[in-house]
Image (spheres, rainbow, N blue to C red):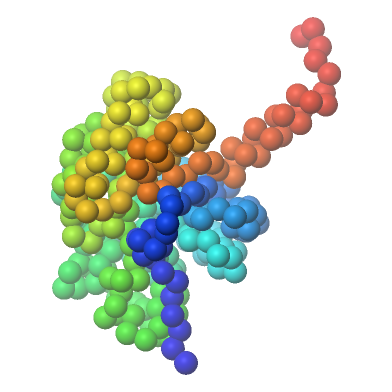
Amino acid sequence: MPLQLNPTLDRVLDAADRPLIGGWVCSGSPVMAEIMAGSGLDLVLIDMEHAPNGLESVLAQLHALSGYPVTPLVRVSSGDPVTIKQVLDLGVQNLLVPMISTPEQARAVAAAAAYPPAGQRGIGNALARSGRWNRVQNYLQDAASQVSVYLQIETAEGVENAEAIAAVSGVAGIFAGPSDLAASMGLLGRQTHPRVIEAVKTTFAAAKRAGKTAGVNAFDPAAARDYLEAGAAWVLVGADVSLVARGSEQLAADFIPRTAD
């Protein structure tokens, strides 16, 4: 019997009656991925840009997530077409590509994620998990509906071009990264500065005009709630490594006596 893949994030968003909430897995650990997957979050994003992840560890984490009712995403390290091809062949259906500032970059990513004639993705579905080794019927013909591509807006230039970026064919939506955006605006480390928040909300409006959805990274609870009220379709509100870091620090503060030193 032919296999069916899970719905892509754009379809999940279309069917949802509320914004979706998710978290990052930055440890490279399939155990942590499974813990996050079983938490009740809607989304779990595996990071390859700032985390110690390669193809094998991403695959292990995809396996760990597969038994849970959660939508997985993977952020690749860049828009490199070879990396995008390899990650898609792992079976990644929801792709986030960082540091996109121009429509030209957006079109290059969309082409890397699509089979010819729409794009230039190499064909290896018979050998790869993407089409479950030819067990997903018509995967080649239907691949565009099995993959959703999101582009991360992280520069002032990207905010200016957000509508044109979101409007690119083959792009499902955009995702604001306030940390790098703040740095590009001369506000390093100040991702909740009013100017940064305004710029993020500008990307929401731009995506809406293009008929696409927008998400955002927001570990500050007040900022996350503000972005949800402003129309974010999905928000990533924490990461495994941050939760462990802050939790272990609290244990130390609670149980280790302070000294004069």
- Establish if 71 lies above or below 138: above
- The quadrant the C terminus occupies is top right
Residue 133, by quadrant, is: bottom left
Residue 39 is situated, as x and y percent measured from the top left of the image, at 62, 53
Q: Residue furthest front?
A: 17
Q: Is residue 135 visible?
A: yes
Residue 234 is situated, as x and y percent measured from the top left of the image, at 41, 48
Residue 24 is situated, as x and y percent measured from the top left of the image, at 51, 47
Count of marks, rendered view: 0
Q: Residue furthest top?
A: 260
Q: Is residue 50 left or right of residue 69?
A: left
Residue 259, by quadrant, is: top right
Q: Residue furthest bottom?
A: 1
Look at 19% across and 47% down and name the residue there: 209
Residue 164 is situated, as x and y percent measured from the top left of the image, at 16, 47
Viewer-closest of 146 and 258 = 146
Viewer-closest of 31 and 209 = 209
Q: Is residue 245 left or right of residue 200?
A: right
Look at 39% across and 38% down and name the residue there: 229
Q: Is residue 8 left or right of residue 101?
A: right
Look at 52% across and 47% down and name the residue there: 23
Viewer-closest of 207 and 165 = 207
Q: Is residue 80 visible?
A: no
Q: Is residue 16 left or right of residue 258?
A: left
Residue 122, by quadrant, is: bottom left
Look at 44% across and 80% down and name the residue there: 4
